[in-house]
Amino acid sequence: MTPEAGFRLRHKHLLGIEPLESDEIRLILDTAESFLEISKRPIKKVPTLRGRTIVNLFMEPSTRTRSSFEIAQKRLSADSLNLAASSSSVSKGESLVDTARNLEAMAPDVIVLRHPAAGAPHLLSKVCRASIVNAGDGAHEHPTQALLDAFTMRQKKGRIEGLEVAIVGDLLHSRVVRSNIFLLRKLGAKVRVSGPPTLVPPGLEKLDVAVETQMDAALEGADVVMMLRVQKERMVHGAFPSLREYFHLYGLTFERLRQAKPDAIVMHPGPMNRGVEIAADVADGSTSVILEQVTNGVAVRMAVLYLLSGGAVGELAA
Amino acid sequence: MPTSNDALVMDEGKIDRTLTRMAHEILEKNRDLESLVLVGIRSRGVPLAERLALKIREIENVSIPVGVLDITLYRDDATTIGPHALLKATHIHFPIDGKKIILVDDVLFTGRTIRAALDGIIDFGRPSCIQLAVLVDRGHRELPIRADYVGKNLPTAREESVEVHLKEEDGRDEVHIVREGTTSRKAEGGSKRA
């Protein structure tokens, strides 16, 4: 990487981690380091995106991601507008493309989209001039979550390369796991995943990860233990007999955590189901970095918005 | 890389003597050292601020705090021509309310970097005053900004560029005037085009 080439993204949109090169991922993480400092100042605001308009289009409920993006935008002095599915014309039957075209007519610079359908941000990127940031599309990708997870790992472990990362839980409905696998593999970490066989999507091992049915096997010697939320709202029919049984087999307890390295950190993208995928004492314990993930999320999203708003960038993302 | 259009205007000894004189000028103008702080503008203002602090310590045996300011986020062209350099952190770990700040940079040119730095500083508090120290003033101001301490006034043509090399960043202490098109490392912004 030449020093001159290393400070721009080669994409206009952030649709996922999969299209990014490892140097672009490192650029986002390095840039986020600087933004972390702004959130510690008495005046938590810089004028960088003054006059830029950002639309947060959330077609699915979200508190953490939406508020994190919103704070990131405010700290960069951008003007932001929040649209939620329940309060917009979407509930009157308007299609995504029509919603987007109407928004586009108001000339936003960036659209942050959360949508239940995989690929919705890609569709939007083809009809809009604005930069699109994927804030979670179906079970496909959630790139800013993977970036903040990687940022937190790097902060705690000093590196990503060579880390052993165990991801446990509902792998089938999780966009977080997919983005994390892409990112961690690109930066040279090793990934093991584990979850109930009914919640493991077929072909996951093709992403170059070890799939373990037994949670203990996935945890053994891990540097990072990432728990995924059991997405009760997406379970159409019984993927497992009961939440109690789920906790018994795949819930993270201090007992189980002993399989991992003594200095392993515990992560969770939130919102947590205490007593389902994670025991309350582990979630609140000294090895948990769950709230630091939230803090880091703001800095990472500031970095993404800053880098995408950096004027003319070369090619468009596919 | 020296070429025929590359003139050396300051060498290591000259830079050192200039900084010694600037340190004396700073002390002459600011008798109350208690409230004095130095803030270097990234990237080459930072080693210059550190060297000035060292010289002040040698002369008066007082340690002056040194802060680091990255003005990237305050540039007026931040979103029109995109990132100039990798964004680095600002480190001002001391309260600046009521302090006398000496802002330090390598080259004073259009004044836009200093304008951005003033905005950046003021986001950290309300200093009692801000003064400006630069190693080279090359003219061509676009804003009503002037330096309080100037190492060397260097008349230049607009198409020329002034390259400052410092040991901490570049391995050697030299100031060059380079005719555009022949420069080894084109001044791509940052402190070079101050």
Image (cartoon, grey):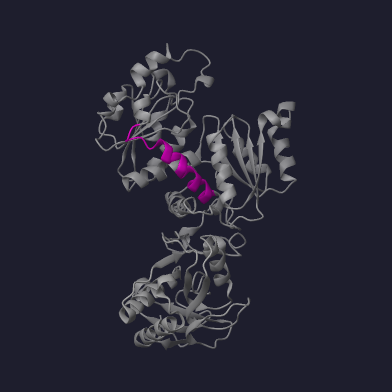
At a point 58% along the width and 75% down the height, the residue shown is B111
Q: Is residue A246 above or below residue A115?
A: above
- Total count of labels: 0
Q: Is residue A177 above or below residue B75?
A: above
Q: Where is residue A165 in the image (x, y as percent from the top left)?
A: 33, 36
Q: Secondary structure of the magenta portion, mostly?
A: helix
The image quadrant of residue A134 is top right
- Work out which quarter of the rendered image holds the N terminus of chain A and state it: bottom left
Report whether A208 appears left or right of A31.
Answer: left
At a point 38% along the width and 13% down the height, the residue shown is A245
A8 in magenta: no
At a point 48% along the width and 43% down the height, the residue shown is A297
Q: Which of B154 and B131 is in front in this view?
A: B131
Residue B83 shows in the view: no
Q: Where is residue B167 in the image (x, y as percent from the top left)?
A: 34, 75
Report whether A89 appears left or right of A222.
Answer: right
Q: What stretch is highlighted in magenta?
A: A285-304
A286 in magenta: yes
- Work out which quarter of the rendered image holds the C terminus of chain A and state it: top right
